[in-house]
Image (cartoon, helix red, strand yellow):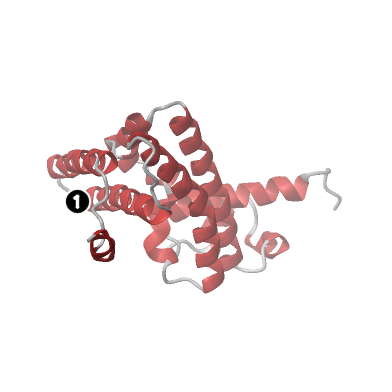
Amino acid sequence: MRYAPGHNEAARDRIVDAASRLFREDGIAAVGLAKIMTEADLTVGTFYTHFKSKEALVRETLLRALKVRHEELGQALRAGDFEMAVRAYLSPAHRDAPGTGCPTAALASEVARHPRATRLTFASQIAPSLDLVADCLSTRRGGVEVSRAEAAALFGLLVGTLQLARATPDRVESDAILEAGLRAAFRLASSDPEPSKSTRARAR
């Protein structure tokens, strides 16, 4: 059977879109190829026409999802909406929609147990977003240079807060966790980093 031009690309996109949502909603390990292909409205047997393995699909899913989040973050920060971006991240709406939300919050803990190639894909795609956050923090602090590692600490606070809020079944308590996370994030974003012991020793 002959397919129209672009058929394979369109089918591949449907697989990635379905996997991206299902992985974030249910977890990578819990989602089998049969469920992904059903969601994509394709037969299971055609999966290996597009991907060598489920792990290859995981990497492609991370690649695309993290790129989309990076573009969204860049738009928000370039518009000077740092506080709005943080509030949107730690919002009840984001908490309640993991399937379309931040792939880092939904998948980072699982990715940490995946092969090195998958972890490298994750790290390489999240690095540009951390650089954006670092630049934004530097601007908020009057030009004081902020490292990628410090940006990761702030982002880690946001990710961890969202994960805890999602894991807390009591709605009121979950909302309180989000609010506390917001306050902590704004304090961290506005304060100068404390010097390390080695820096203090050199200053003496």
Quadrant position of residue 36: bottom right
Quadrant position of residue 171: top left
Q: Residue at x 25, y 44 (%)?
A: 188
Circle 1 is placed at which residue position? 168
Q: Nearer the viewer, residue 161 or 153?
A: 153
Q: Is residue 88 above or below residue 33?
A: above
Q: Count the numbered circles shown.
A: 1
Dot 1 falls on a residue whose secondary structure is loop
Q: Residue at x 26, y 58 (%)?
A: 203
Q: Position of residue 85 (x, y in %)?
A: 37, 34
Density class for disc 1 (Cα within 10 Å; few <14, some 14-19, many ≥20) is few
Q: Nearer the viewer, residue 172 or 65?
A: 65
Q: What's under tag 1, amino acid-wise?
A: Thr
| Residue 96 in view of the camera | no
Q: Which residue lies most toward the right here?
A: 2
Q: Position of residue 148 (x, y in %)?
A: 42, 53
